[in-house]
Image (cartoon, rainbow, N blue to C red):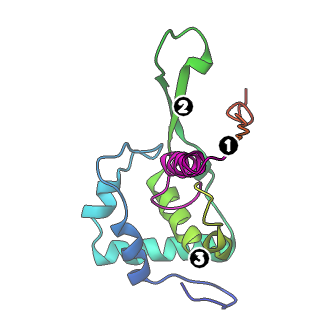
Amino acid sequence: MKRGSKNPTINQEFLNDILKYLKRNKAAGNDYISNEFFINGAIQEFIYILTWFFNTNINTSYIPEYFSISLVTPIPKKGTMKSPTDYRPISVSSTLESILESILLSEMECLKNIHKHQFGSKKKLSSKHAYYLVNETWNHYRQNGSNVYILSLDACKAFDKL
């Protein structure tokens, strides 16, 4: 992506690099186009059209309405299924939307400055890493004879919507 220009643009090489990171065997979104279509069908003429499409989206600040629609599937948690909280929602977005998101995220400076102890919004990190860090810190202080006090806040319901 050209930096600092009035009209930022991506080139075909940059788009090819983004397409390399698409995962195989993922469900198709609301456009019913799978990642494999972009991985296996990425001939040069198609890449040219996609590059034009994404540059138009970026330069006009236009996002197609269907990019904001995801297919949501409720996955049962363990135990009885008596209320909506007994299910975990899995949402699948359009592959085109995911590609555009990857393009935009790759250029967002604010994401490059995330604190080293934040585990969300970072590639290859998860809550397991946070658990490991807390566990190792706990063990270190306990082995050295210190008291350890932990305050935990469960914000899982903070983002629920009807």
Q: CA distance from mark 1 to mark 3?
A: 40 Å
| Mark sitting earlier along the chain (2/1) | 2
**Residue type for callout 2:** Pro
The secondary element bearing badge 1 is classed as loop
Residue 125 x %, y % = 49, 56
Q: CA distance from mark 2 to mark 1?
A: 35 Å
Span colored in magenta:
120-148
Q: Residue furthest left?
A: 40
| Left or right: 44 in relation to 64 | left
Residue 137: say if magenta.
Answer: yes
Residue at 67 percent across and 33 percent down: it is 156
Q: CA distance from mark 2 to mark 3?
A: 29 Å
The answer to whether residue 125 is above or below residue 62 is above
Residue 83 x %, y % = 61, 12
**Residue type for callout 1:** Val
Question: Label 1, on which residue?
Answer: 148
| Left or right: 115 in relation to 35 | right
Question: Label 2, on which residue?
Answer: 89
